[in-house]
Structures are given as C-alpha cells and as structure tokens.
Image (cartoon, coloured by chain):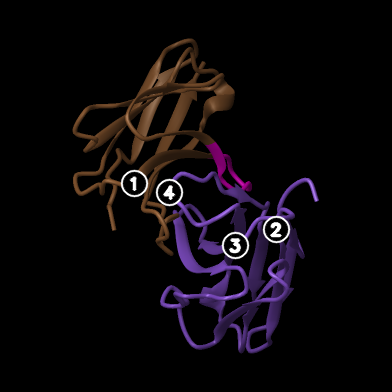
Amino acid sequence: GAGVSQSPSNKVTEKGKDVELRCDPISGHTALYWYRQSLGQGLEFLIYFQGNSAPDKSGLPSDRFSAERTGGSVSTLTIQRTQQEDSAVYLCASSLEISGGTEAFFGQGTRLTVV
Amino acid sequence: LAKTTQPISMDSYEGQEVNITCSHNNIATNDYITWYQQFPSQGPRFIIQGYKTKVTNEVASLFIPADRKSSTLSLPRVSLSDTAVYYCLVGANNAGNMLTFGGGTRLMVKP
C-alpha cells in the first residue's frame, strides 16, 4: 500500500475483554514498530520486529500484551483482559531496516478506549 | 542509548524563524539525528535527518556542531500550521530502541 495502514481506527471495548490491533506496513519494509501514546503524552515504545522476529519485548507494559508478525508483513498487537489504563492511541511504524539512518513511516493509529 | 533533552514548549509568531535545540551528550559514532513532527490525532511524520554539519530540505534545516552533542532544528518563517510537537531522536545502528521518542517540544505558533 501507499502507507502504513492500521485497523480499526477506533475501538471501544469493555474492561476485561481482549482486543486485537492490526498494522499493515509499507510493502518491503522489514522493520515494524509499535508505540502507545496516552492523551497529551509522548510516544511509549512497545516492541519492534525485524522480519518476523522480535528481539526485544521488554517495552511491553505487562504480560497481557503480545504481538506477532507473520510473513514479514502484517503485525497484530493483542491486549488481553483490557484495563482502563490501556486506553490510548496505539501507533505502528515501519521502515526499510532498523538503522539510525532510516526514515520510519507511521500509521494514523488505533484509538483504544476501555470502558 | 543516547538520551535526548529538548525544551518542553516554545511559542512563536507567524513569519518568524524557530530554532529548537536538542541535547544528546552521549551520542554514539554511528548514531543519526532525526526529527519528527506530530499533529494532534496523527502519527509522527519525518521532517529531516542528519549525521553532521548541516542538512537542508524544503521544510527545515538541521544544524549539527562538530561534537554532535546537540542539534538544532530550524523552521524558517513558521505559519499557524506548523503548530505541532517536534521530536528529536538519536538512532544507533541495529538498535531495537532506535526509535525511542523523548517528550518532544510543543511549538505554538500565534498569529
């Protein structure tokens, strides 16, 4: 696609339910990143993928959070037993590779509201 | 990990030049310096990137002194639409935390 696509754009869920957030990176981009941004705050790094592997999962806030990437393309971020503090905008980005000299492209985000 | 420090906020007026400085005292040899812009309800957008000296594109200029311990994003003749949060990032090659965002600088452009 022309850019990074995230779905859904908005998600309202009840506390305790599981949610899945999807990210379609730019075709050919090997690196994929997930971030979380609470209202008025900066971006909190969650996890990155190089291909299908995620070398560093330490940014995930708790074991209720997991992410996978299949085929080196689409990634899914899953939040189990959602809590109200999980409410935030979840942003995905992709780049050609993990390198300080590479531009990353962001999607529009998924706004998650846990009620 | 090279940590960055930026002013929390800045105010400016339309038509002025705005300079936002970022400190990154422990920048590594292979690190690049990248600036992103974020409007409300949108994901960050790449503005400019550099390694040393000066880089200029159609949007901004980036000044990096010889010691590379700081960098300055320069926005010429800002307009109201430049009101946004600006993030400075320092990225190490093959580092999973390459895109670690700091708090950013909230720029408010007034008429």
Q: Upstream in the sequence, badge 3 or badge 4?
A: 3
Q: Which residue is mark 2?
A: A25
Q: Disc 4: which chain?
A: A
Q: Upstream in the sequence, badge 3 or badge 2?
A: 2
Q: In the image, what residue occupies the spot 46% across and 64% down?
A: A45
User: Given contact means CB atoms under 8 Å apart, are the residues at marks 4 and 1 in contact?
Assistant: yes
* Whole-percent x, y for residue B111 in the image: 52, 15
User: Given contact means CB atoms under 8 Å apart, are the residues at marks 3 and 4 in contact?
Assistant: no
Q: Colour of chain B?
A: brown
User: Residue type at mark 1?
Assistant: Asp
User: Residue type at mark 4?
Assistant: Gly
Residue at the limit of the structure toward the right, as seen here: A1
User: Residue type at mark 2?
Assistant: Pro
Q: Disc 1: which chain?
A: B
Q: In the image, what residue occupies the spot 41% across and 53% down?
A: B101
Q: Which residues are magenta?
A: B38-46
Q: Which residue is mark 4?
A: A100
**Cα separation between marks 3 and 2:** 7 Å
Q: Which residue is mark 3?
A: A32
Q: Which residue is mark 1?
A: B31
